[in-house]
């Protein structure tokens, strides 16, 4: 098992209601910052399925139905992700995991096993009415799942842009309720460890993204591990 850089690999769950803009912000941030990676339970699982990986194929139908995976399955998926990170990655934003106190413990254990560090839980806070208005107007790519700015083709892969079927109003009300329950279930674990960072998601997307970057993007004042003449690391090399 490859180790993330000791003390530098930080894992940050990012949560927010549907419409909080977290996926858009995280995709933009990972494109700007090569040392930041994004893990999404849904997108990584579908990518594994697309690559024909047995783990991905086992998750595919559940993900496409918008249902939750069993704890052990997500645990395995997340472990696979961590073990295949490019060497330059120092910080990971995690979407869709953990969802409850048991998954919090699983996540913390996976992080610790790899010599990485549990970072702050970033909560992008948006009231239900504002989240509802935003979701009513958003589109995603039916090919790669990325947010699309307008009707037509996806700028990334050329797939068709459409509303997600689970953005329809009745689904949305359920997802907002589920988010509030999830948020209440995972916050205590991070608050007790002084690792809760609440971001006011009612502000313009650029401001939310800038604050997320403060949480997620590795501190450039720290010399990269293994740099010539750098301080000797604590971990194995
Ligand atoms: Zn696409």
Image (cartoon, grey):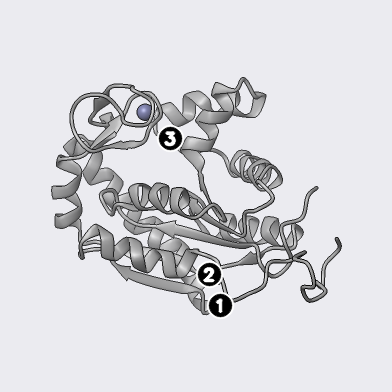
For disc 2, the marked residue is 189
Residue at the spot x=63%, y=74% of the render? 222
Assign a secondary structure to mark 2.
Answer: helix
Residue at the spot x=25%, y=27% of the render? 161
Give the class, few, some or many, for how many residues have Cα within 10 Å of label 1's Cα (few <14, many ≥20): few
Q: Is residue 86 left or right of residue 184?
A: right
Assign a secondary structure to mark 3.
Answer: loop
Q: In front here: 78 or 175? A: 78
User: Does the image show residue 125?
Assistant: no
Give the class, few, some or many, for how many residues have Cα within 10 Å of label 3's Cα (few <14, many ≥20): few
- Residue 34 is tagged as none
Residue at the spot x=25%, y=49% of the render? 19
- Residue 193 is tagged as 1
Q: Is residue 2 left or right of residue 222?
A: right
- Of pointers 3 and 2, the one earlier in the residue sequence: 3
For disc 3, the marked residue is 67
């Amino acid at each position: 098992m490859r180790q993330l850089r000791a003390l530098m690999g930080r894992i940050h769950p990012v949560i927010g209601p549907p419409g909080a803009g977290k996926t858009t912000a995280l995709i933009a941030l990972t494109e700007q910052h090569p040392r930041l990676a994004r893990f999404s339970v849904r997108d990584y699982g579908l990518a594994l399925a697309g690559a024909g990986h047995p783990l991905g194929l086992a998750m595919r139908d559940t993900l496409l139905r918008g249902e939750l995976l069993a704890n052990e399955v997500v645990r395995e998926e997340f472990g696979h992700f961590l073990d295949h990170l490019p060497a330059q990655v120092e910080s990971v934003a995690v979407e869709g995991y953990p969802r409850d106190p048991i998954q919090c413990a699983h996540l913390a254990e996976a992080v610790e096993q790899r010599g990485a560090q549990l970072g702050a839980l970033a909560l992008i806070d948006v009231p239900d009415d504002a989240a509802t208005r935003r979701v009513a107007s958003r589109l995603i790519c039916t090919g790669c799942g990325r947010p699309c700015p307008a009707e037509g083709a996806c700028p990334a892969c050329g797939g068709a842009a459409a509303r997600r079927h689970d953005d329809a109003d009745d689904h949305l009300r359920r997802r907002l309720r589920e988010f509030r329950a999830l948020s209440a279930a995972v916050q205590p674990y991070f608050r007790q460890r002084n690792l809760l960072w609440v971001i006011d998601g009612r502000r313009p997307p650029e401001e939310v993204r800038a604050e997320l970057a403060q949480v997620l993007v590795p501190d450039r004042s720290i010399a990269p591990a293994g740099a010539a003449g750098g301080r000797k690391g604590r971990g194995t090399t």
